[in-house]
Image: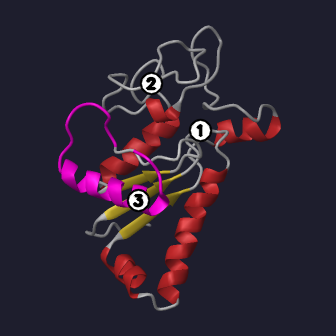
Amino acid sequence: PEKIEDKPKVLFLGQHHARELMTQHAVLDAAEALLRDAKSGMLKAQLSINEMSFWFVPVLNPDGLDYVLSTDRMWRKNRSRNVANLRGVDLNRNYSVKWGVCGNNSSESNSEVFKGLSPASEPEVQVNEKLNERLHFQYSISYHSLGDEVLNPYLCGEMAESAVYFKVRDELSALLQYGQ
């Protein structure tokens, strides 16, 4: 971990939303499958490991997960205090890039999709953004357990190399038989 290699990097994230319990397992399964395939001699997996760097974060929302396991199995957000002594921010909607510009988000603190009081106000998002600043991930895969779809990063605005992202999105959608 202390050595940052000059190779393309891929980040696998689970548990943005506390109640999406299977996503942490999806991240761990992806790591296990990659290592198993490489160990068994699968050339594509071996080349991937040699030519890329993989980072796996099974649980991005530990306090939300703890609350789901102990108190409310349908809790979605983290457990930070926001306004009016209410709790929780939807971590998926708290990132700095295009914060609150488009998509389904809310400024209402009691909303399931509350974006937070400011961009990257949440420690979980701050750590993830700092990790990306340091490593410059080429791809980030965030697992969610609702929707059966593969989404590209920005639903509004332009992104560099959009054709590459759309190609990857379309290939994943076809493989998983999901919509977009």
Q: Name the secondary structure under disc 1.
A: loop
Inter-mark Cα distance, 1 to 3: 25 Å
Question: From the viewer's perspective, is the residue at label 3 or at label 2 nearer?
Answer: 3
Residue 104: which disc? Answer: 2
Residue type beneath disc 2: Asn
Which contiguous range is marked in magenta?
153-180
In the rendered image, the residue lying farthest to the bottom is 41
Residue type beneath disc 3: Ala
Inter-mark Cα distance, 1 to 2: 15 Å
Q: Reply yes or no: does residue 109 show up in magenta.
A: no
Question: From the viewer's perspective, is the residue at label 1 or at label 3 nearer?
Answer: 3
Report x, y in % for residue 27: 56, 60
Asked whether residue 2 is in view, the answer is no
Please give the residue where the numbered disc 3 appears in the rendered image: 174
Report x, y in % for residue 152: 34, 45
Q: In the displayed structure, does residue 51 sit left or right of residue 110?
A: left
Looking at the picture, does residue 37 appear above or below residue 88? Answer: below
Q: In the depicted view, which residue is nearer to us: 155 or 66? A: 155
Looking at the picture, does residue 134 appear above or below residue 10? Answer: above
Q: In the depicted view, which residue is nearer to us: 35 or 161? A: 161
Q: Name the secondary structure under disc 2.
A: loop
Q: In the displayed structure, does residue 180 sit left or right of residue 21?
A: left
Please give the residue where the numbered disc 1 appears in the rendered image: 17
Q: Sequence-wise, which precedes: disc 1 or disc 2?
A: 1
